[in-house]
C-alpha cells in the first residue's frame, strides 16, 4: 500500500514569514481564473468582458469565497462550536471553509457585480463557470498536501489505497485526488467544451451546478464524512445533502428552455 508522504505544509519560509502550499494552490487557482478569463473574453461571444472586468470579478469572487466559505462552515458543519466560541468565527487562519457556503458567497458577490455593471446575474455566472474548476482542482491538491479530508477505509488490494499515518494505519481512499480529478479537471473539460458554443442564458451555469453536484455526491462515497448539523452519516453525508439542491437547480436551469443560442 502507498503511504501519504506527509509533506511539510510550508513551501518556503523567509525568517518569521512562511508561505504554505495551500496558499500557493489558491494563487494557482486565481492565476488560472485570470488566464482562462482573458482567453474567454477574447472570443466573439464574450467581447463585452474586459481585462478589468475579469480582475474585478476575481476580487469580488475571492471575497465571496472567504466570507461565504467561513459562514458555511459555521452554519452547516459546526454551529454548536461557534455558538460557544463566537470569536473563533473570525479566525479564518485556523482553517474551516465549506465549499457550498463559498459558492453561495460567490453568488451574492456576482449578483452585486452584475448589478453594478449593468449585466444580468446569469450572464456573469455563465462567463465564470468554466473558469472555476481548475481552481477547485488546485484547492483539492492543497488538501492532499496538507493530509486533510482523507478518504474512507479501502480494500487493501486497491493499488492506490493509501495509509495516512497521522490518522491510523488503515488503507484509505486518497479522496482529495479523486475530487481534484473529478470536480476539477473533468468538470473543467466538460464546461470548457460545452461553453465553446453559444448557449441560452443560464444553461452553462446549470451545467456547472449539475456537474459539480453530481461529481461531489459521488466523491462523498469515498471520503470520510464530515461532522455536519445532522451528525456523521455514512449513508448520506452532509456534503451529499448540500449537493442535491445544486443538481436540482442545475436541471431546472438547463431544462427550463431549449439549450440553444440566445
Image (tube, rainbow, N blue to C red):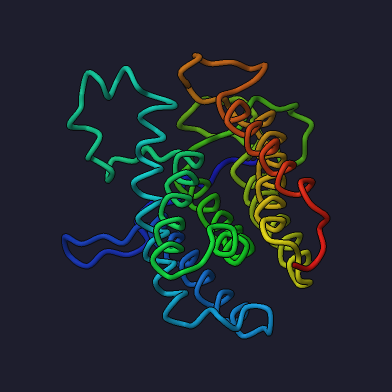
Question: Can residue 66 be seen here?
Answer: yes
Q: Is residue 26 left or right of residue 261?
A: left
Q: Is residue 12 left or right of residue 168?
A: left
- Does residue 148 lie above or below 136 as drawn? above
Taking the spot 59% from the left edge, 40% from the top edge, the residue there is 3
- Does residue 122 lie above or below 166 as drawn? below
- Figure quadrant of residue 1: top right
Taking the spot 61% from the left edge, 32% from the top edge, the residue there is 151
Question: Can residue 1 be seen here?
Answer: no
Q: Is residue 192 left or right of residue 84?
A: right
Taking the spot 65% from the left edge, 29% from the top edge, the residue there is 171
- The x and y percentages for residue 231 are 49, 14
- Does residue 253 lie above or below 13 as drawn? above
- Does residue 198 lie above or below 11 as drawn? below
- Figure quadrant of residue 160: top right
Q: Quadrant of the C terminus?
A: bottom right
Say which of 104 and 48 sits in front. 48
Say which of 197 and 189 sits in front. 197
Amino acid at each position: 500500500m502507498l503511504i501519504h508522504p506527509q509533506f511539510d505544509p510550508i513551501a518556503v519560509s523567509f525568517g518569521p514569514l512562511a508561505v504554505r502550499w495551500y496558499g500557493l494552490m489558491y494563487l494557482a487557482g486565481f492565476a488560472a481564473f485570470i488566464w482562462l478569463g482573458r482567453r474567454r473574453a477574447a472570443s466573439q461571444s464574450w467581447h463585452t468582458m474586459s481585462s478589468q472586468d475579469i480582475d474585478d470579478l476575481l476580487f469580488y469572487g475571492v471575497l465571496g469565497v472567504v466570507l461565504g466559505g467561513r459562514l458555511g462552515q459555521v452554519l452547516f458543519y459546526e454551529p454548536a462550536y461557534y455558538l460557544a466560541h463566537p470569536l473563533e468565527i473570525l479566525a479564518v487562519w485556523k482553517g474551516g471553509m465549506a465549499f457550498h457556503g463559498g459558492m453561495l458567497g460567490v453568488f451574492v458577490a456576482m449578483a452585486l457585480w452584475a448589478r453594478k455593471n449593468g449585466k444580468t446575474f446569469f450572464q456573469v455566472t455563465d462567463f465564470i463557470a468554466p473558469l472555476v474548476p481548475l481552481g477547485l482542482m488546485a484547492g483539492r491538491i492543497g488538501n492532499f498536501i496538507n493530509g486533510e479530508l482523507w478518504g474512507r477505509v479501502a480494500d487493501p488490494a486497491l493499488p492506490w489505497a493509501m495509509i495516512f499515518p497521522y490518522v491510523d494505519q488503515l488503507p484509505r481512499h486518497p479522496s482529495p485526488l479523486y475530487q481534484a480529478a473529478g470536480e476539477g479537471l473533468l468538470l473543467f473539460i466538460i464546461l470548457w467544451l460545452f461553453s465553446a458554443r453559444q448557449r441560452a442564458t443560464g444553461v452553462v451555469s446549470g451545467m456547472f451546478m449539475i456537474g459539480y453536484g453530481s461529481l461531489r455526491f459521488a466523491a462523498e462515497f469515498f471520503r470520510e464524512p464530515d461532522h455536519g448539523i445532522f451528525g456523521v452519516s455514512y449513508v448520506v453525508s452532509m456534503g451529499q445533502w448540500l449537493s442535491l439542491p445544486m443538481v436540482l437547480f442545475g436541471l431546472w436551469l438547463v431544462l427550463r428552455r431549449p439549450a440553444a443560442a440566445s
